[in-house]
Image (spheres, grey):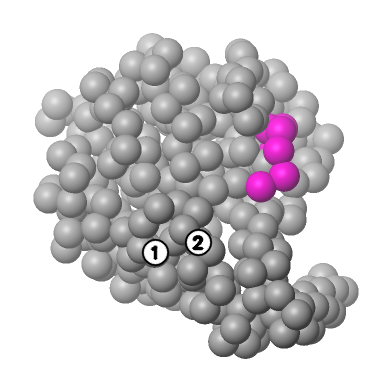
Amino acid sequence: MKNLKFIILKKLYSLYLNTLSYVSPRKSAEKALTLFKTPHNKILKPHHIEHLNKAKIREYNTGQYKIPLYRWPGAGKKILLIHGWESNAYRWKPFITKFNESGYDCFAIDAPAHGQSSGKTCTPPDYAMAINAVIEEFDMHIILAHSFGGYSTIYYLSHYTSGKHLEHIILKAPTGNLKNFTQRFFELLELNQKVRDSYISLFEKKYGQPITYYDAERMVQAIDLPCLLIHDENDDVLPVEDSAHIARSWKECEFIRTSGRGHRMNKSETINQINRFLQDLSVRL
């Protein structure tokens, strides 16, 4: 049923945006950009809310969004957990259980327009602003981020200077090449060339830079922190080649290719691998 609903919605969006482009290419591009920024899986289940509310310690107001901060305290180093697109802080529960057992002090937020945060749309600059708000108050030592959250973390690190106490970054399957990701969005909706050209023009005018400026492999060149980067060869959401390019451009990056874990990488194999890395890191530091 979910697949059928997705197919129908995709066809409707495709028909609407392509038809509108013959009347107003700019209006069609504006609608497409809004769609690109809009998550569609915000509803939390009751047990998610109960679990998160027990850990909620405060709420940030970034001006545009209200962002909840959750904390599962520990006596050790502080870890900030940054979830991906159409997810929420609850997705980190098995990681937090393991990290708490090892003594780490765990924090997480819901991205703008995700989980219990306010808003309807979310961009990497929006998410980075929320990350910055937390790190300005708490001296985080490690960031662990996934997918869109990984890309937003890269954006944060290359645009903000609040992370003076950060020691290491861990990324799982981050978004890498924004231009290629945008092309996949075009292809998914089967958008015509009018929409595509108008979209790129609108994006570059709105954000003041060519779209390639926002490629992760370019942004990481300005980051001095060491990084552990994990990406699965069987990822059917984001290509592992994106992380390969990031790793080559990052000054100090350990890149691990896995097999058979898919995009989410939330099973015990990955959790234990990252936990061991953190313990080894504590010894080295």
Specify which label sits upstream in the sequence, 2 or 1: 2
Q: Is residue 79 above or below residue 266?
A: above
Question: Where is mark 2, residue-wise?
Answer: 203
**Main SS, magenta residues:** loop
Magenta-colored stretch includes residue 21: no
Q: Residue visible at 51% across and 30% down?
A: 130
Circle 1 residues within 10 Å: few <14, some 14–19, many ≥20 = some
Kindly state the secondary structure of the residue where label 2 is placed.
Answer: helix
Residue 168 position within the rendered picture, expressed as x and y whole percent measured from the top left: 25, 35
Q: Is residue 215 above or below residue 143?
A: below
Kindly state the secondary structure of the residue where label 1 is placed.
Answer: helix
Q: Residue visible at 44% across and 61% down?
A: 204
Q: Amino acid at mark 1?
A: Ile
- Residue 119 occupies quadrant: top right
Q: Amino acid at mark 2?
A: Phe
Q: Is residue 244 left or right of residue 131?
A: left
Question: Where is mark 1, residue-wise?
Answer: 211
Q: Is residue 58 left or right of residue 116?
A: left
